[in-house]
Amino acid sequence: MEEQADRVLEGDRFAWEFVEGLTTEVGPRQAGTEAEARGREWAMNWLRQHGFENVRTEPFAMDTWVPGDIARARITEPFAQDLVVLPLGNSAATPEGGIEGELVFFRNVHELRAAPVGSLTGKIAYISHAMKPAQDGSHYGFAGPARWVGAGIAAQKGAIATVIKSVGTDYHRNPHTGGTTFPEGVEPIPAAAMSIPDAENVERMFARADGRQIRLGLELNPKALGETMSGNVVAEITGRNPELPPVLLACHIDSWWNSPGAFDDAAGCGIIAAAAFHVQRTGTPLRTIRVLMAGAEETGLWGSKAYSDAHIDEPIAVGLESDFGADRIWRLESNFRDSNPELHARLAKAVARFGVADSTVVATGGADLNIVRDQQGALIDLQQDGMRYFDLHHTPDDTLDKIDPVQLRQNVAVWTSVVGLLANEPRAILTGGTVPSAPPIMDQ
Amino acid sequence: MEEQADRVLEGDRFAWEFVEGLTTEVGPRQAGTEAEARGREWAMNWLRQHGFENVRTEPFAMDTWVPGDIARARITEPFAQDLVVLPLGNSAATPEGGIEGELVFFRNVHELRAAPVGSLTGKIAYISHAMKPAQDGSHYGFAGPARWVGAGIAAQKGAIATVIKSVGTDYHRNPHTGGTTFPEGVEPIPAAAMSIPDAENVERMFARADGRQIRLGLELNPKALGETMSGNVVAEITGRNPELPPVLLACHIDSWWNSPGAFDDAAGCGIIAAAAFHVQRTGTPLRTIRVLMAGAEETGLWGSKAYSDAHIDEPIAVGLESDFGADRIWRLESNFRDSNPELHARLAKAVARFGVADSTVVATGGADLNIVRDQQGALIDLQQDGMRYFDLHHTPDDTLDKIDPVQLRQNVAVWTSVVGLLANEPRAILTGGTVPSAPPIMDQ
């Protein structure tokens, strides 16, 4: 396995070719749409061509939202100019021609929460944050609520719409979309993300307003389509002993509509498929390696839930997900460091030569590993460098050119080493110990 | 002047505040529109507040084109997906609902020129290039023709539209607009720029097409408005001897509609105004310093031509323009190095301590210095670092956050040193020697 991993490090093109093919031949793959279905077909063909077995789609029904084709925002007073926005997932549409209202500034979602009920009647809430890049991506948990719950809170206080500073860390005029949710019984309102340069401009306007209202015009035409079909793509490298629980490698095949989702998450799918492929090239592994390319992750983990519902009674040996870009892996985490220290140490040793540090952080698994969390099973997180992940996350800028082939090869080499050990491990991987029950907030 | 330049280097906020104010309070300033008029008003107020004299607008008529609010492109076959485009200046509109046709690949404008007449009938020309960043920006001359003349050539060969790979060097989904021209008698066709990631994606599609047509749907709704009014903003620091020909400092106040034009050219206007202001603070200069914030540069140097037409008989001592961003100045060029070596050497010495090298390159002057070229007068080019200029040029990304305050201060310090020497120079600056007659291609 060491030799194979070294070959991967030097010259793997497998993951790259998956990402290049999917982003070029299919492009954006919004959950529940025909574009996502084309993504599944493309992935299945590709997996079959590369020797995967039992390649199939497992369909499921979901509630589908589509963004429409109008996203216009304009400061009307006092500093008239257009701004760049995109709707958030689950945003309502404005009436045709748009709405207009006073923009009310909130430094963060805590300030919004503190606003009296009714204080936003007829107004538009603007929610900021102070997100900074972090290697582990942890600022997403810090700034994310502006998007995840801001619109719902604003709606409850009477707002006619919400615009947020994009939850991201770049300086380009590409808004970061992503899902927002409205509490039970709260009618959705129009909700949009503004690019960070535009958001900073609006904040400068507030500083210069000198008592004048800042007024915003907003027009969006997204649409809730009701129930449509999505699906999970599943494929396997059959092990020598198919009776043993399989190693489950997860990613998601859908993307937001506004980019081909190279980082999020074509790369993850390419990485896990490459790892399975490279392990198989060194000889049939003991355990089956199952690849799960989940559908409809972005809009609410529909595929992850459907997979768990359908297969909860079929034990998984260990689950790993790649859904945080394609930069280098820098840290190994598991949830069996205490209970199975021998295996954890063997994994840590295998990846050390690629510059991956061991860690006491307890792995929680990626978004598409609901089944493993529901089974209270073994999890490994191969943490990828997140310093530029939130420059690209959910923006139009998530394109093939952002993938660094050198870092991608290190990533696949680490995955190949880890999956090779796990797939040839005869003993149970999780022999007790801490198991997290809460799903992670990352990558949704 | 040395002391003043040092103070500028350490702590000038003057140029920054101009750029911040104009981009925040006015934003985009498309030539010939009410937004450009608001830009003029804002600039005049600001110049008056900062002690400039004879502040005025000199109006002129121009042919005005506006971009509309629809710019949609979609590959329809075989790899269906949306692409990000923006119209080029002077583009025609498509019919409502758009057009669709086979996309024909040209590696560069030379290949397009070689295509037989009629070979593009009913088709859409795609024109690429291989522009790379260069400190002197010279690749713009190499790649620019794809935009400047590509659409006109394609139209003559029967094309129903043209899309070009954006003339730029970044990797963001922000197309680079800019003017294109159609030869006399050639009916304009729809012409758009594609973001560079999208263009590379399309080129990958051609590589994978395997005999299949690549087909593009395109919808644009720009409009030629006919004649509207624009204007040049002129302001002065009156010299001790107003009879001497003035030093003319130029920039342009208009921007493309898609950004607030922080680099192009709010920064240039801030830099020249700051230089004049700082020189004046050391004592009234011998010569008048005249600031020309030209209108309608982007769409065809309308303001530059109008200024020259109106003032051709009033000699200018020397002209300098800032219209290449706000990064550090790295090279001094003049057109009097041979004819007035003493002054050139004094200038070179004054700027050497800011890291500015002397050069034998003959200055040609910026786009708004038509009057100086028409008078065959003295020119200085303070070359700014262009390594990232074409990442931003004519894109939505040309926003305040791109300006590096440290480089901007060096820039203003160099300008202050140079303008201080020129404005206190009692002798004629151009005493003979090489005078270029062709306008530069840069910055248009």
Image (cartoon, coloured by chain):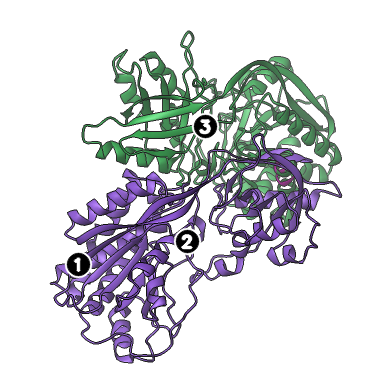
Chain colours: A purple, B green
- Give how far across and how far down residue A315 sits, in percent: 30, 78
Left or right of residue A373: residue B316: right
Q: Which of the numbered marks, if any, corresponds to residue A170?
A: none
List the residue tagged with mark 3.
B71
Amino acid tagged 3 = Ala
The residue furthest top is B185
Comparing B419 with A200, the one in front is A200
Left or right of residue A144: residue B247: right
Comparing B99 with B255, the one in front is B99
Magenta-colored stretch includes residue B22: yes
List the residue tagged with mark 2.
A389
Q: Quadrant of residue A218?
A: top right
Front label number (1 vs 3): 1
Numbered disc 1: what chain?
A: A
List the residue tagged with mark 1.
A237
Question: Image point 18% across, 57% down: which residue?
Answer: A50
Q: Could you give the CA–CA distance between mark 1 and mark 2, rounded to whole angstroms?
A: 30 Å
Q: Could you give the CA–CA distance between mark 1 and mark 3, rounded to whole angstroms?
A: 46 Å
Comparing A369 with B155, the one in front is A369
Question: Image point 20% across, 79% down: which residue?
Answer: A424
The secondary element bearing badge 2 is classed as helix
The secondary element bearing badge 1 is classed as strand
Magenta-colored stretch includes residue B297: no
Amino acid tagged 2 = Tyr
Q: Are marks 1 and 3 on the same chain?
A: no
Q: Which residues are magenta?
A: B19-23
Question: Image point 76% across, 49% down: which residue?
Answer: A123
Question: Image point 57% across, 30% down: which residue?
Answer: B335
